[in-house]
Image (cartoon, coloured by chain):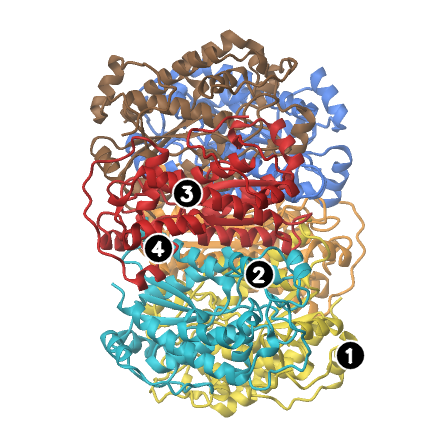
Chain colours: A cyan, B red, C brown, D blue, E orange, F yellow
C-alpha cells in the first residue's frame, strides 16, 4: 500500500461515517490506496471488503492568466485522495481528458468529444464491474463533465436494462467538489461575486495548496461580476463554441477574480470538500 | 399558417418581451406556426424575420398507474405551442423518443440510448443551421433529457470549435418547463412533498388539461414522501437500471401523489410556464 | 382509452380481418389506442391480447410551394390511426425526423443521417421487444425511409442472428401507404403523370383532408411529366445531394402537379389506404 | 491493360451506347480494365477520359445444397466485367462481404452489419471522389445489399448537403443484374415459379457458366412455389433472423428449383444482363 | 471442390506439417478450397475436420509507375491459395479494401478508415465464429493493415473478455508474407537496399508471376536507398497524410527499385512464402 | 514553470541533440514543463518556440504478484518527464486507460476498447493541432497500445487526406521505452530469458526506482522461459481473451522473473531510455 502524496488531511471519522464504513466493510484505514500503485492481489483482497471505487474527473483546459491547465484534475484528485485516505477507498486513475470545446481557442486546452468521454467511461465501468465492483463514485472538478458523464451512466444502465449484459447493473454517482455544502459555503463567504464560473479563486486556491510554487506573478484585473441570468444559464459549463467563448472572455476567466486565491484558502476548502465527500460517499454506499 | 390546436393561452406580450421580439424581428403574432404545418416558402419568409426555433422534448415512458405515457411530450408541446403562439416563434417537431432506460421494466416505455439521442439532436440542429437558423430553444418535459441534450450541444459546438464546420456556430438552450419560476412556485405551493419526481401531480395536471378525457379512475395510494437526499441525488432522472427501478418503485411513480392532479391546475401551470418560456426565450435571443 | 382525433374512418372489419384479429386476440375495437395517450397498465393489458404495434414513419421536409413540411408524417399517421382504430392496434409515436438530405437546400427541411435513423429504430424496437412486443408494423409516408429502415431491420435481426441477444427476434414490416393496391389505383386514375414523385397530389390531398384549412393559395404551374427512366431510377427518393436537387427542381416538386389535390380525394385515398393497411397488417400477423 | 479473365462476351456497341460513350469520352475499347490490375498512371490517364467506375457487389452466403457461397459476387463480377470490357469502363474491386444475417445459420455465410457495409461504401466512394471520380455504378448480385447501399448513398450525399465536404457531390447508382429487362424476361420464361428468391436457377446458371466444373451432383428436390405475398414482402432479401430463416428454409433455398440451372442458360443470361448494364450505365452517365 | 487457379505450387508436406495437420484433422489435400467456390454443405463437412480458415488481406493502392494497384492483394491471395492447396485449409474472401490514407494522392487508391476495417474484420470473424470456426489466419500483403487488424482482434477478444458474448473466444493471427524467413532471405539477397518499402521488387515479382502479362514498359529510375532510421520509423506503412506522402515520394515508390523485379523471382518468393505459411499456420493450430 | 517531481536525471545534452533542439527553437531548459502545471499563456509562449509535445501512454492492468497496476504508465511518464526536463519539451497528460482486454480476468485491470482509445487519441491530437501543435511524440510503456495508436494515427491522417480538415496534417510518432537501444541492451544483459513479456523485471525495476517503497514482499517463483515462437507471435501484447490468458498465465506474469528487479537497475534503465528518447525525439523533429 502506498502512502499519501503530501496533501494529506488529518480528518477523523465521525460516528456516522464509521458506521457506514463498517457496514460496507471498509478498512477505516488512514492510508491512501491508488489503483495505479496497488498490485492485482491487493485489489483482489480489497474486493473482499468493498465493492466501491472513487474516480477523479477533471479537465485539461485553460484557467485564465494565472490558473493551471490541470486545475480541475488537481482539485478532483486532491478531494478523491483525501476521501480514499480517510475511508480506505480505492482511487482509480483520473479522467483528465474531457469535454471543453468552448476553451479550444486558448492554447493548451484539450477537448474530447462528449461521445468519446462517454465511451471511455462506459469501458472504465464495465471493466471493473466484470471483476465485482458495484459502486462507482466520481469526484468531479469540471462542470462540463456533468452532462456527458450522466449520459454515459444512462448508456451503462441501458446495457443491463435492455438485457444485453448478464448479472445486475453497477451504480454510478458523480459529485462536483463545490457541491459539498461546507466547501460551497466557504467559497461564497470568501469570494462572493468574485467566485465567478471559471478559473475561480476557490479552485485556484486548491491548486496553490496542492502544487506548492504554482502561483504566477501575473496581474489579472478583476473582471466584472456576472449577471445572475448568466450564472444560471451557463452553469455546468454550458457554454458555446470556442470562437464565441474567446470573443466574450478574452483572458479565459469567466467572471472570476482569480487574484483572490490563497493557498491557505485552498487547504480549508479542500478539508471541507473532503469532509463532504466522505459523508456523501458513505450515503452512496448506504443507498438502497 | 395553421391555427392553434385548442389549448391556446390568451397571453399578452409584456413590454420587455415586445422589445426583445422586435429586436429579433419576431412577428408578435398570435398564431401558432408549427414546422410540420408550414410550407417551405413560409419558412423561408420566417427566416427573413427570425433565426430562432423552439423544439419540444419529451419522452415515451410509463407515468405510473394513471399518468399517460406521453405525459412529458404533451406538457413540453403545450408550453412550446404557447410560446410559439404568443411570440410567433416557429415550433419544430417534438423529440418524443428519448432516454428512459430506468423505466424499461414498465410496459410501453421506449428508451433510446443517450448516444442515439445525441446523434438525432446533432442532425436536427445541423440541418436547420445550414438554412440559416441560429438559435435553438428546447422546451423540455423530461429530466433524463437534460444530460444527453447538453452533451449533444457540446458535440455540436465542437464541430465549429475544431474547425470542421464553416461559418459560425448555432446556439442551443434547453429549459425544462418546471424551471420557470412561476410554474415552479405553483407546484410547490399546491403539492409540496406530494410533487415527488416522476408522474408528478403537476405534469399530470397539464395532461388532464391538454388531453380532455384523459383522467383514469385508478386508485393510487399516496406514496411516502421522498427524502431530501434522494431528491438531490436523483434530480434530472438520475436513476439506475430498469430492474432496480422497478424493484424500488413498484407502481412507477417516484414519490409523486398523482391523485392531487386537476385539469384546472394544469391550465394555470401551463399559463405560468408559457409566461416563463416567453421571458426566457426573449432573454435567449438577447444574449450576447 | 383515448378517442380518435377527428379523421376517423367508419371502416368495418371484413371476415378475413376478423379471423386474423381473433387469432391474434386483437380487441376488434373501434377506438384508437395511441401509446402516448395510454397508461402503462393499459399497455400491459394490451400485451395480454396482442404482441403487435403500428408505428408511423414520415419526414420533415419541403413539399413544394403549397405542400406542408409534415406531409409525409401527417399521411402516415392518418393511415396508422385508421388501422389502429379499426383493428384495435396500439399505435406508437411517429418517427417524423428522417432522411431527406436532397431537400436540405429548401428552408424547413430537417434531415438526419441514415445511420442516426437506424440507431433510433433499433432502440425503439429493442425497447418494446424487451417488454414482449414481437411484431412491428411501420406505416410509411416517405420514400427515403425505406432503405435505412430496412437496413435497420437487418441490424436488429443481426443481434439475434449473431447470438448477442437472448430469446427470439422480433419481426418488422414497413409498408408505404401508396403501395396498398386500392390507394395506388386511385392516385393513378386521378392524377396519371401529374402524380410525379414528391409533393404529389395524392399526399397533398390527404393533408388537405386531415389538416382542415391547410390549403395554400399559391399558384404552382404544372411541371412537365417525368420520364419513365427517371421514375424508375429515383423511386424511393433515390435522389442526390441538396445542391443538385435544388438545381434540378427549383420549386421543390419532383414532377408532381400539386394543384390536382383535393380534400375529398384525400378522404377517399385515406379510406383506401386504411383498408389496405388492415389487410396487410392482418397478413403480417399471420405470417409463419 | 489487362485482358479479360475468360468469360468474355462478344458484345458490340449499339448506336445509342456509342453516342453515350463518346459523350463521356469512354474509349470504346474491348479490353477489360480492372482497378487491381491497373497501375496508378493508367488510372490517372483513364480519369482524363472518364469520371466513372463500375463496382460489383455480391455476398458470401449459402446458396442451398448446390449453389456456391460466392454466387452473388461471381454473377455481379461477370456482368461488371462484361460492361467494363465492352464500354472500357474501369471496374473496381468487388464488395463481396455484405449483409446476410438471415443466412448466418448456414455454414460458410459471412454477414457484416448494415452499418459496417455503409461505412465501407462511404470510404470507397470518398476515396475515389477525392481523385476526381464522379459516377459510381454498382452492379449488384445480392438483394440484401440494396437497402444498406442506398442508405450509404444517402449518408454520402448528406456530407455534401450539410456543407461538410468541399466541391460537388459524386453520384451513385446500384442496379441488380436481374433488373435488366432482357435478363429478367429470360429467367421468367425459363423458370417461372421455380426461379424463387434465393439460390435461384438463374444465378446458379451464371455461376455454372463462369466457374466451369462448379456443378454439384447433389439431388435437391423441387421446393414448393412461393406465394405471391411472400415474394412481394420478402423481395430484396427482406428476411428475418438466422434461426427463423433456417427453420423456414431447411436446405437454404427460398422457393428456388436450383436443378433447373444450366451453364448454357448462364451464358445467355449473362449476355442479356451485360447488354442491359451497358444501356443503363450509358443512361446513368447521361443523366442531367 | 474447385481446382487451383493457375499459380499452384507443387509443395509437399514435410513431416512436421503432416503431424500438425493430422492433429487438426486437416485433409492433407492438394486441392484448393475457396469459400466463394464451395457450397454450404461442403463447409459444414469441412467444419467436421477443421475449425480454421485462412483469409488474405491486401490493399487497393498505387504501387508506383509499374506496380499494379492490387499488388498487395494479389500477393496475399497467392500465398493463401498455396497454403490452402497444400494443407487443405479453407480460404475466405480477401479483404482487399483497406487502410492506405497516405496514398490517396495517387489515382486509383482506395482507403477505408481504420475503424471501418476494424468493423469489417469484427463482423467477418463473428459470423464464422458463430458457426464453429475458431482459428482465423490472416495472410497479409500490406503493412498498413497490421495495426488496425490487431486493434480489431483486441476488440473481438474484448467482447468475450467483458462477458458480452457466450462461449469461448476465437483466435486470430496475422502474418505478412515477407515475414516468413525464407521469403525474407530471398528478398534481402536479391534486392538489398533496392527492396525499399513500397512497390518493392519482391512484391512486383510476385505479381509478374501470378498475373502473366502484367509487366509495364515504363522506365522508372532507381530511387536513392532509404536511411535505416526511415526504414525503422516507417515500417508497417507508418506514413503520414496523402499530401505529405506525395510530396516526398513523387512517383509513389518508397525507396524501391521496382525494375529489379522478375517473374521468376516471384515464383521462388511465392514458393518460399507458401512454405513459411504452412509452417506458421501449423504452429498456429498447435498453439495451446 | 513547475519543477521536476523527484526522479530527475542529470542528463546533459550531447551535441547532436543540442543542434536539433536549437533548430526547433527548444529552450534547452532543465526544467520540466507539464501541461497540467502550465498556464495557457505559458503554453502560448511555448508555441512560439516549439510545435511539439510529448505524451506518455501506459496502462491500468495487473502486473503479476508484485508489479504495480500502473507500471506501464509510471515507466512511460518517467521517460517522458526526463525527455521534457532535458530538452524543454512540453509533456501532456498521460493516456493511462488503454487496451488490455486479455488482463480483464485479473482484479484491478481496466481495459477500454481499441476504438475508444482511437477516438481519445484523435480528439487529443485534433485539439492541440487546432492551436498550432504539429508533432506529437508518444512515449509508450504498454505493448497493446501500439496497434490502436497507429490505427488512430491513420484515421487522423485520413481526415486531412480526404480533404475534410483545413491546413496541413500533424505528425505522430509512438516509441516504446524498451525500443531505445541502450535500454534494450541493459534488459537483455541483466535478465536474458527472465525478462519475458509482462511484469518484466525491467519495468518493475523502473517502478521500484520512481515509486520508492513500492517493493512487495511476495514470493513469486521463477516462471519457465518462453519459447522464441511465443515471444515473436505475442509481441506487442498480441494476446487472446481474458479467460484464455488467465488460464495460461495464472499469476499474471508472462514469462517474466519479476524477482530480478532492482531499484538501481531501474535508475540505469531509465537514464538509458531517456537518452534514447532525447535522440529519437530530436530525430523526429528533424524528419523532413
Residue drawn at (63%, 15%) of the image: C227
Residue F35 image-quadrant placement: bottom right
What is the quadrant of the N terminus of chain B in the image? top right
Circle 1 packing at 10 Å, graded few (<14), some (14-19), many (20+), is some
Report which residue position mark 3 lands on. Answer: B58
Report which residue position mark 2 lands on. Answer: A227
Residue F22: numbered disc: 1
Residue E27, visible in the rendered structure: no
Residue A1 image-quadrant placement: bottom left
Marks 3 and 2, how far apart at CA: 30 Å
Task: Give percent across and percent down for residue B83.
Answer: 50, 39
Query: For the residues carrying marks 3 and 2, which lies nearer the camera in this image?
Result: 2
Task: Give percent across and percent down for residue B26.
Answer: 61, 37
Residue drawn at (59%, 21%) of the image: C66
Q: Are marks 1 and 2 in contact (CB under 8 Å)?
A: no
Marks 4 and 3, how far apart at CA: 20 Å
Same chain shared by disc 4 and disc 3 = no
Q: Earlier in the sequence, mark 4 or mark 2?
A: 4
Q: Does residue E175 appear to the left or right of C276 in the view shown?
A: right
Up-down: is A197 above or below E44?
A: below
Q: Are marks 3 and 2 in contact (CB under 8 Å)?
A: no
Same chain shared by disc 3 and disc 1 = no
Query: For the residues carrying marks 1 and 4, which lies nearer the camera in this image?
Result: 4
In the structure shown, which secondary structural element does the residue marked by tag 3 occupy?
loop
Report which residue position mark 4 lands on. Answer: A157
Query: For the residues carrying marks 3 and 1, which lies nearer the camera in this image?
Result: 3
Query: For the residues carrying marks 1 and 2, which lies nearer the camera in this image?
Result: 2
Amino acid at each position: 500500500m502506498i502512502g499519501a502524496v503530501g496533501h494529506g488531511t488529518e480528518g477523523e471519522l465521525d460516528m456516522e461515517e464509521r458506521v457506514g464504513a463498517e457496514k460496507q466493510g471498509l478498512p477505516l484505514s488512514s492510508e491512501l490506496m491508488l489503483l495505479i500503485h496497488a498490485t492485482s492481489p491487493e485489489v483482489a483482497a480489497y474486493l473482499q471488503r468493498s465493492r466501491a471505487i472513487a474516480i477523479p474527473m477533471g479537465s485539461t483546459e485553460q484557467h485564465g492568466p494565472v490558473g493551471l491547465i490541470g486545475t480541475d484534475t488537481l482539485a478532483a484528485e486532491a478531494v478523491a485522495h483525501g476521501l480514499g485516505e480517510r475511508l480506505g477507498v480505492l482511487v482509480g486513475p483520473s479522467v483528465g481528458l474531457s469535454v471543453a470545446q468552448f476553451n479550444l481557442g486558448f492554447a493548451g486546452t484539450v477537448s474530447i468529444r462528449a461521445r468519446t468521454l462517454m465511451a471511455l467511461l462506459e469501458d472504465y465501468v464495465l471493466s471493473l464491474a466484470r471483476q465485482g465492483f458495484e459502486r462507482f463514485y466520481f469526484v468531479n472538478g469540471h462542470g462540463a463533465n456533468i452532462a456527458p458523464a450522466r449520459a454515459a451512466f444512462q448508456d451503462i444502465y441501458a446495457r443491463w436494462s435492455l438485457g444485453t449484459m448478464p448479472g445486475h447493473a453497477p451504480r454510478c454517482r458523480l459529485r462536483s467538489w463545490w457541491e459539498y455544502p461546507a466547501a460551497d459555503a466557504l467559497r461564497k463567504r470568501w469570494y462572493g461575486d468574485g467566485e465567478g464560473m471559471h478559473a475561480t479563486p476557490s479552485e485556484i486556491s486548491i491548486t496553490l495548496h496542492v502544487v506548492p510554487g504554482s502561483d504566477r506573478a501575473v496581474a489579472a484585473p478583476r473582471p466584472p461580476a456576472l449577471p445572475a441570468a448568466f450564472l444560471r444559464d451557463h452553469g455546468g459549463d454550458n457554454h458555446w463554441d470556442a470562437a464565441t467563448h474567446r470573443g466574450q472572455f478574452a483572458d479565459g476567466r469567466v467572471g472570476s477574480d482569480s487574484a483572490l486565491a490563497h493557498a491557505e484558502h485552498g487547504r480549508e476548502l479542500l478539508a471541507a470538500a473532503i469532509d463532504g465527500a466522505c459523508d456523501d460517499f458513505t450515503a452512496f454506499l448506504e443507498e438502497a
